[in-house]
Image (cartoon, rainbow, N blue to C red):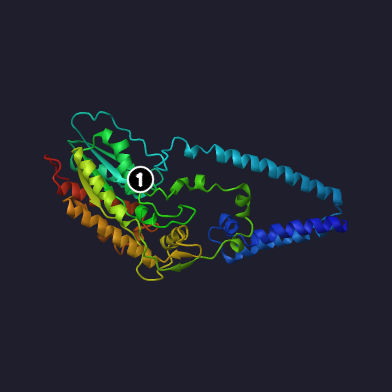
């Protein structure tokens, strides 16, 4: 092997090797929970590539400089094809087709007859991803329907899930006026806090400065359209990611600018739902943020850190967990005070879930056992309100 060919190979491989070595993306892709032996083997395999020329020499395989030039030419062609494919996919991303320009994500299609059939009691559950559920499980509304059908077997009851991830109270208002009121719900169950709270963070990638009272600064899912990722940036996520990315540190944060719009939206939602004659149950939102530093090393704790890192409060800092705890407590108080002000039935799910971190998979989303408990809380409130005049004991 000639000296120029050797220099070309070692130089290219060195860039790739050290890029992968310092890339958290690569390690987490292949080793979600990398043990020391797994990392050692992974790095050993990568490091062995430096000795490929010596191995080829031992195998009497001759590679001239023109072969390496050919490899470089092939890589250039591969880069061009890959970049064209990447941008074509970005321009034709089916996930954005048909999405409402303001709602950020398409609301769930409600499989319900319009107009509502006679004799049907229709309940619509509204909110964010904690209402929507995950993995097609139907969230707490599906469990609530089972409980109601068992308790009131002679009644025609529908429980529709109108939750959608990233939805705030502002989205719920638009969702109700644009879709839900046509379903003629008899009862609406609605809660939201965290999604309104996070709009107080105005840093990219999910938002932009300054804060807007209509939440127009917060992009949510549409951040990918507001801040499109170049092909080069996509590739760089596999190279030197840890060296390039700034190290964020936690600081106290109290600038919850969305608190007033949140209260305004709750009051508006109460007024418009009542104007259509729909009964309403409001709730605060359960969470497992901690008021003290640290905590046990559970999956939920790790996911909480990931959540906080995605919402920096400035170029170098993210809000510490105690700040998120204080923010959720503040917004939950606003929800309860607003319900009391308008004499709306209220479910204090935050109090019931307090201290039950084992029921969470991250800061607010629940495991199936937690979803069942949440459904039971709303079921108890429906029964307490004596909505159905004819009741059959379990």
Which quarter of the figure has residue 209? bottom left
- In the figure, 76 relative to 293: above or below? above
Which quarter of the figure has residue 35? bottom right
Residue reaching furthest to the bottom: 293
- In terms of secondary structure, where does tag 1 sit? helix
- In the figure, 140 relative to 259: above or below? above
Q: How many marks?
A: 1
Residue at image coords 27%, 47%: 190
Please identify the quadrant where the C terminus is shown. top left
- In the figure, 126 relative to 178: above or below? below
Residue 9 location in percent, x, y?
79, 56
Residue 52 location in percent, x, y?
78, 57
- Quick one: label 1, few (<14), some, or many (20+) residues within 10 Å? many
Which quarter of the figure has residue 142? top left
Q: Is residue 352 visible?
A: no
Residue 155 location in percent, x, y?
18, 36
Q: Closest to the observer: 72 or 57? A: 72
Residue at image coords 34%, 64%: 325
Q: Is residue 122 visible?
A: yes
Residue at image mark 1: 132
Q: Closest to the observer: 262 or 44? A: 262
């Amino acid at each position: 092997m000639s000296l120029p060919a050797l220099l070309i190979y070692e130089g290219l491989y060195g860039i790739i090797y050290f890029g992968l070595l310092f890339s958290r993306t690569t390690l987490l892709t292949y080793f979600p929970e990398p043990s020391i032996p797994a990392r050692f083997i992974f790095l050993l395999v990568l490091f062995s590539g430096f000795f490929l020329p010596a191995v080829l020499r031992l195998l009497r395989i001759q590679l001239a400089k023109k072969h390496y030039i050919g490899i470089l030419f092939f890589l250039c062609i591969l880069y061009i094809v890959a970049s064209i494919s990447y941008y074509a996919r970005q321009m034709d991303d089916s996930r954005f087709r048909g999405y409402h320009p303001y709602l950020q994500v398409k609301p769930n299609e409600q499989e319900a007859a319009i107009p509502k059939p006679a004799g049907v009691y229709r309940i619509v559950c509204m909110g964010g991803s904690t209402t929507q559920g995950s993995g097609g499980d139907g969230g707490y509304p599906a469990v609530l329907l089972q409980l109601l059908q068992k308790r009131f077997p002679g009644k025609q009851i529908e429980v529709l899930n109108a939750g959608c991830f990233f939805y705030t109270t502002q989205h719920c208002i638009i969702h109700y006026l644009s879709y839900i009121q046509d379903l003629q719900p008899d009862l609406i169950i609605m809660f939201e806090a965290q999604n309104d709270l996070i709009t107080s963070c105005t840093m990219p990638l999910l938002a932009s400065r300054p804060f807007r009272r209509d939440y127009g600064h917060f992009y949510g899912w549409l951040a990918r359209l507001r801040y499109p990722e170049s092909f080069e940036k996509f590739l760089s996520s596999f190279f030197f990611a840890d060296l390039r990315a700034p190290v964020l540190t936690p600081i106290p944060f109290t600038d919850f600018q969305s608190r007033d719009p949140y209260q305004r939206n709750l009051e508006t939602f109460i007024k418009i739902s009542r104007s259509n004659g729909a009964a309403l149950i409001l709730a605060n939102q359960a969470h497992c943020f901690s008021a003290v530093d640290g905590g046990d090393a559970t999956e939920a704790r790790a996911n909480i850190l990931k959540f906080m890192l995605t919402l920096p409060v400035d170029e170098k800092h993210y809000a510490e967990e105690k700040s998120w705890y204080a923010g959720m407590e503040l917004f939950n108080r606003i929800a309860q005070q607003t319900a009391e002000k308008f004499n709306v039935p209220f479910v204090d799910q935050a109090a019931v879930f307090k201290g039950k971190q084992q029921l969470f998979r991250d800061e607010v989303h629940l495991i199936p056992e937690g979803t069942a408990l949440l459904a039971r809380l709303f079921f108890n409130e429906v029964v307490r309100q004596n909505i159905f005049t004819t009741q059959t004991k379990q």
